[in-house]
Image (spheres, helix red, strand yellow):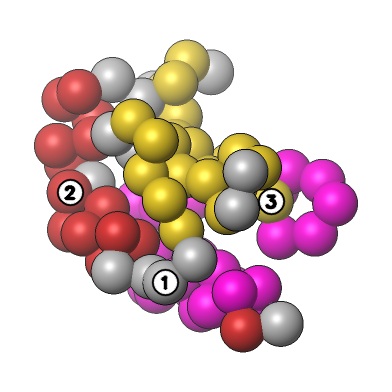
């Protein structure tokens, strides 16, 4: 599964805007977010769609982000981590 390219990130721009508004996240390059000095979130694309790799604990978790519901669930989990 390859990292999301510019065209894929264009399709996720609404989600990217919402992530940029989260205090505590820094976008180091388009679609790659850090929390403090540690990589926290990036995106992949493959024939099955788009996925976010996010560090919700000690390990990476891969979550689908193809629908509004999936994106909302991702944002809720990220907000929980940022508030902890």
Percent from the top left, x then y, of residue 57?
80, 59
Upstream in sequence: badge 3 or badge 2: 2
Say left or right for 12 vs 73.
Answer: left
Check contact, mark 3 vs mark 2: CB within 8 A.
no
Say left or right for 81 vs 10.
Answer: right
Say left or right for 3 vs 14.
Answer: right
Closer to the eye: label 2 or 1: 1
Q: Residue at x 53, y 18 (%)?
A: 1
Q: Is residue 14 above or below residue 22?
A: above
Q: Does the magenta stretch include residue 42?
A: no
Quadrant for residue 69, please give it. Answer: bottom left
Q: Distance between the residues labelled 3 and 1?
A: 16 Å
The residue that label 3 is drawn on is 55
Quadrant for residue 6, please give it. Answer: top left
Please name whichever residue, 26 or 49, is drawn nearer the observer in this view of the structure: 26
Percent from the top left, x then y, of residue 59?
82, 46
Mark 1, other Cα within 10 Å: few <14 / some 14–19 / many ≥20: few
């Amino acid at each position: 599964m390859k990292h999301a390219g510019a065209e894929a990130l264009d399709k996720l721009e609404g989600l990217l805007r919402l992530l940029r508004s989260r205090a505590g996240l820094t976008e180091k390059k388009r679609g790659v977010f850090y929390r403090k000095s540690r990589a926290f979130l990036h995106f992949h694309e493959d024939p099955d769609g788009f996925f976010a790799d996010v560090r919700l604990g000690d390990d990476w978790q891969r979550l689908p982000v193809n629908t509004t519901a999936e994106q909302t669930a991702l944002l809720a989990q990220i907000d929980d981590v940022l508030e902890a």
